[in-house]
Image: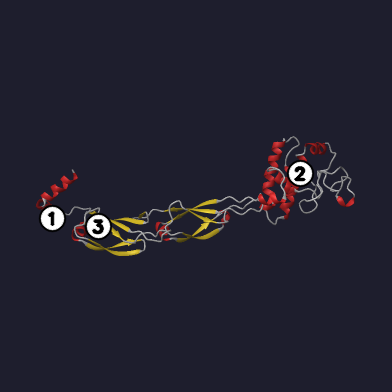
Amino acid sequence: MRDPYKVLGVSKDTNPADLKKTYRKLAMKLHPDKNPGNEKISDQFKEVSAAYALLSDEKMKARYDRGEINPDGSEKGFANYNQQGGNPFGGGNPFGGGGGGGGGAHPFGNGFDAEDLFSNLFGGGRTTRQKSQAKKRGQDKTYNINIDFLEAVLGAKKQVKLEGGKTLNINTPVNVKEGQQIRLKGQGSPGFFGGGSGDALIEVHIKKHGYFTIKNNNIHMDLPISLSEAVLGAKVTIPTISGKIALTIPKNSSSGKVMRLKEKGATDPKTKKKGDQFVKLMIMLPTENDSELEEIINKWSQDNSSGNQNIREYLN
């Protein structure tokens, strides 16, 4: 085994708190659960743990600094000497314990368990049963996705790019709401000690539409109409979330009149019932002066002065 100071990257005068902090950082990085199948990393984890085991023991550290023991904790002249040849230390680990261990000969004998040392750092040694209970689920990861208004109302298939460059195709729910999260199980951060991965949470953000808005599953829109359409009535083509339809505007329709299109709204995710579409009529006058129109309105206004007075009295 190499010099434990070099293994951990610390000096002889490093205090116990900083030593523990350094080991913890290295052990978290090199832990086998975070590097499955990588034997090289697993060996590094064991070496780092063994180095910490020696340097964190005040008496063993002092003996090593005086040159009385080897980096693996054995007496000078007995490096890596284990049970098979009549070990003068009683057939095992100079730190005590003759059984268990990490699966093979370790620098401190077959009784040394790097996993136990790692667990001890987080609040005491654990039995096999307790280790299984210490499995820690990975963290959830949140991602944002922007979708169009109609995609939100009708549902859509979208591609999401996750951490690490992984891409997934997801189906957004029908009538998804602003800020709603779509959960993708097991697509978050990996767990620790054999624990399951966290989830990916896809937070939905909806782009504003040019003329549609939604409230309580009902679609709302303002419909510009001409003065002649308002006075004489007309049949016009208007958009809905499911396509264009014909709408009949009654004669003498005032600006602000709201017309209801039954079941032309969004589908409720729970009841599966459809809302309505509400169309608000907005009379648009010509942008340029029209002398002929002015003459007609002027004559009409004079002939209906009493009606205009009644309107003003209503407003008062």
Mark nearer the N terminus (2 vs 3): 2
Mark nearer the N terminus (3 vs 1): 3
Closest to the observer, 79 or 125:
125
Q: Local crowd at mark 3 within 10 Å, few (<14), some, or many (≥20)?
A: some
Taking the spot 69% from the left edge, 45% from the top edge, the residue there is 26
Of the two numbered discs 3 and 1 in the rendering, the one whose residue sits closer to the viewer? 3
Q: Is residue 63 above or below residue 155?
A: above
Q: How is the image coloured?
A: secondary structure
Q: Position of residue 126 (x, y in %)?
A: 71, 47
Q: Position of residue 88 (x, y in %)?
A: 89, 45
Mark nearer the N terminus (1 vs 2): 2
Q: Is residue 279 left or right of residue 20?
A: left
Disc 1 designates what residue? 296
Which three-letter amino acid code belongs to the residue tagged 1? Ile
Which three-letter amino acid code belongs to the residue tagged 3? Ile
What numbered label is drawn on residue 225? 3
Q: Secondary structure at mark 2?
A: helix
What numbered label is drawn on residue 51? 2
**Quadrant hosting residue 63:** top right
Q: Secondary structure at mark 3?
A: strand
Of the two numbered discs 1 and 2 in the rendering, the one whose residue sits closer to the viewer? 2
Residue that lies at the very extreme toward the left in this rendered image: 303
Disc 3 to disc 1: CB gap under 8 Å:
no
Q: Local crowd at mark 2 within 10 Å, few (<14), some, or many (≥20)?
A: many
Q: Secondary structure at mark 1?
A: helix
Q: Position of residue 212 (x, y in %)?
A: 35, 56
Q: Local crowd at mark 1 within 10 Å, few (<14), some, or many (≥20)?
A: few
